[in-house]
Amino acid sequence: MSAYTDTIELQKRLKNKNAETILGAAVNNFLERVVFASSLGAEDQVITDLIVSLKLDIPIFTLDTGRLYNESYELITETEKKYGIKIKLYTPDRKEVEEMVNENSVNLFRKSVALRKRCCQVRKLEPLKRALADYSAWICGLRREQSVTREDFTEVDWDGAHRMPKFNPLVDWTEEDVWSYIKEHDVPYNKLHDRGFPSIGCACCTRAVKPGEDVRAGRWWWEEPEQKECGLHLVNGKFIRTKDLNIEDNDEQISIKPTKTA
Ligand code: SF4
């Protein structure tokens, strides 16, 4: 069985399962080869709390683009202290950043969608690629209701860009579910959420939203909604769902073991 077909099988078994079961399945199927990519958003803080409280052996990393809000850096420190964990940071390649900003100016992302995507490529995608290089599966805090580009996510999707499964344990959670969990479990969260920021990325590309606005309206607000992905969840610039793929993956080296929990 290939990793892709194993993912399809796992996708069926995890349909409508809860977050604990999805995380358990990720560990049981991948052992030390699964990693959690935290964006430090509210959903990701819930997942960090679940990983620690369930005593799951899953390493956690985040991408430090160099343009984050100070509140995000403070949250890293607070989270590490509360849970007694280490969140590994991946930063962009210095040479690539220097070339990019010296060619196009420091705030190049305002000039065009193409330059915004280049900035995300250098500051996020390349570090993510390095972060995932030693792993065979990853976990993230995506939810279907977050945006029009995410409404078809499932509990585990095939990530064609990194050729590995991507587990989405909170895929069917509502925003209310997330905040209820945070309050109930006293989970540390980014203080910008209290100031009108439902979704937090780089400081220069995120603003507060007005009451009633879409939760992602404050991200790259000068672009159209369907353009608003940094590329972390895209393949060749397109949003790809597992069900859209029809590929033979026989060369894939990794294989998923039968799950114990799903
Ligand atoms: Fe660059 Fe903005 Fe993307 Fe951050 S969110 S990597 S600053 S374009």
Image (tube, grey):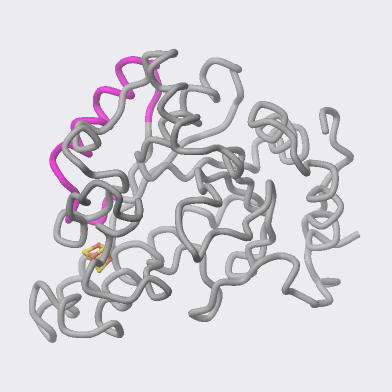
Which quarter shows the N terminus? bottom right
Residue pictured at 9% horizontal, 73% vertical: 106
**Residue at horizontal 40%, vertical 27%?**
179
Task: Where is residue 60? Give x, y as percent.
Answer: 46, 36
Q: Nearer the viewer, residue 90 or 184?
A: 184
Q: Quadrant of residue 184?
A: top left
Q: Nearer the viewer, residue 106 or 11?
A: 11
- Main secondary structure found in the magenta portion: helix
Number of marks: 0
Give me the residue at 58% from left, 70% from top. 161
**Is 66 within the magenta?**
yes
In the image, 57: left or right of 141?
Answer: right
Q: Image check: 27 left or right of 71?
A: right
Picture coordinates of residue 125, whole percent (x, y): 40, 65
Residue name at image x 65 percent, y 36 percent: 32
**The quarter of the picture showing ligand 1:** bottom left
Q: Is residue 4 left or right of residue 118?
A: right
Residue 29: percent from left, percent from top: 77, 39
- Boundaries of the magenta span: 64-86
Left or right of 15, for residue 108? left
Verify whether residue 203 appears in magenta: no
Q: What is the quadrant of the C terminus in the image?
A: top right
Q: Position of residue 98 (x, y in %)?
A: 15, 73
